[in-house]
Image: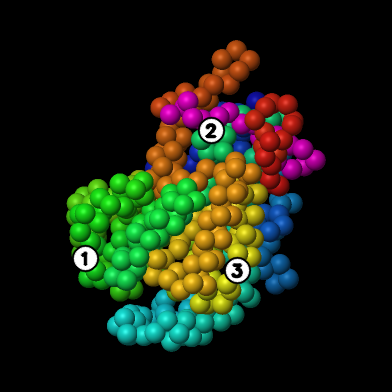
Amino acid sequence: MDRLTSSAPQSAAYLSPAAVLEAHFRIPPGLFDLGIRSPLSESPGLFRFGPGVTCHGRFFPSGPARATDAVPDLTKEVRSAHGGCLLPFDPNEAADNLRREAYAIADQPALAHNAWIRKLYYALRPVLPVSARRHAQRLALRGFEQRSFPVWPVDRSVDCMLERVLALALQSAGVDSVPFIWFWPENKHACVLMTHDVETSRGLNSCDDLMALDQSFGIPASFQLIPHGRYRVTQPALDRIRSRGFEVNLHDWNHDGSLFRNERLFRARAKGINAHADKWKAKGFRSGALYRNPDWLQSLNVEYDMSIPAVAHLDPQSGGCCTIFPWFNGPLLEIPVTMTQDYSLFHILRQYSLDLWKRQLEIALAGCGLACFIVHPDYIRDRRSRDIYRALLAYLDELRDSKNLWVTLPGEVNNWWRRRSRMKLERNGERWEIAGPGSEQARVAFASLQDGHLVYSFSPILKPAVSQTA
């Protein structure tokens, strides 16, 4: 059979279309022939790849889009060839552009792009009451629900694009199913992370009570602590958090909104962040207010970052990585924030209920992905917000058993995702087996086509254990 070739330029970070599937799903290499139609457009742009999936990159045909089709749907441009498939775009580029937010955001809130406004806001922030802050933030974020992309309240464009490419690969090859290494250990359906960003000394003093509340429901959590300026973190405080089964990570440098103001300032502060990562033996990081630059983040001496939301409509920096799965940003594992923050829920949306969180959980669980929460000890001090958080913990505890969820720590997700990335599927007679460190926790799953949709199961027989639409 003729091999299909890609028209995309090769680089150290480049993955061929088949290799992109192999990296995400951990399928055996060499099963599919996937190529890219050429020529691709000179400049990248937004395009659709079926209903509900928006991507960004160069695409075929390379001519200008019609005025009536400003965001074209490329589904009809797929071609079969020699038992393989030719795609009208580069999946590696499309996934990378979404995850790293390379697409243009024209309606950034003023706080994100105006350095002087941001500086003034953070200078006044310590003396501003929450009521004044939330009023200013509502004004800055007004109209967020009208943005069509990324999709609110959870965007899965990267995941759905990869699922549809895999479905096309199965169809073109005439293969009923393909084995892959399941996303989570011990065939857990999906993953839940609870994280606590500690912004003030009052929040730090509330950590013991918050740990007791989490422990009462058996929910582990990570605490992101600010290393400089806001409050003093003692070694006994770190030891106390870890001794109770929780995790310590770094939270920005001093949370003044300026970490990513320019590269020179970031590099200077990164030295202090890295020193504290070593001192605290912390492996994870999250920036203040979820400001971010994926390229600069790679210079931090940590193993994983939790600064990029799936959808950032309610954050000062718009955008979103459009995935509910961890992904590698160079040596750094990015663990996306997929659930609305407690502050945004209570003070921006003015919702004191579980409705939005339940809706987002439903989307994450349907995609067999990650539900990552941020709940601040600073903002759940009053009875109403504390009652909502207690109800969330009870709901997660219920789902843990009924939905077979892996409720764990970010550090454990980091360890698992790195081990999984090094595992391989090997054929042993009629069986597929997983090789590599940690493989005793891994499970072989199968992706199959059923009525045109991609279905996941833990048996080659089409009896779905979990499924999602491709």
**Is disc 1 placed on a helix, strand or loop?**
loop
Answer with the quarter of the image where residue 357 lies: bottom right
**Is disc 2 placed on a helix, strand or loop?**
helix
* Residue 371 shown left or right of residue 175 in the figure: left
Q: Nearer the viewer, residue 104 or 226?
A: 226
Name the residue at 41% across, 42% down.
412
Q: Amino acid at mark 1?
A: Arg
**Pointer 3 residue:** 353
Percent of width and height locating residue 426: 53, 21
- Assess disc 1: are there few (<14), some (14-19) or many (≥20) residues with their C-alpha within 10 Å of its C-alpha: few
Front disc: 2 or 3: 3
Number of disc labels:
3
Marks 2 and 1, the one that precedes in the sequence = 2
- Assess disc 2: are there few (<14), some (14-19) or many (≥20) residues with their C-alpha within 10 Å of its C-alpha: some
Q: In the picture shown, does residue 36 fall above or below 340?
A: above
Residue 150's mark? none
Name the residue at 69% across, 42% down.
467
Q: Amino acid at mark 2?
A: Glu
**Pointer 2 residue:** 186
Front disc: 2 or 1: 1
Which region shows up in magenta?
438-454
- Assess disc 3: are there few (<14), some (14-19) or many (≥20) residues with their C-alpha within 10 Å of its C-alpha: some
Circles 2 and 3: CB atoms closer than 8 Å? no
**Is disc 3 placed on a helix, strand or loop?**
loop
* Residue 164 shown left or right of residue 332 in the figure: right
**Farthest-out residue, right:** 451
* Residue 271 shown left or right of residue 33 in the figure: left
**Pointer 1 residue:** 232
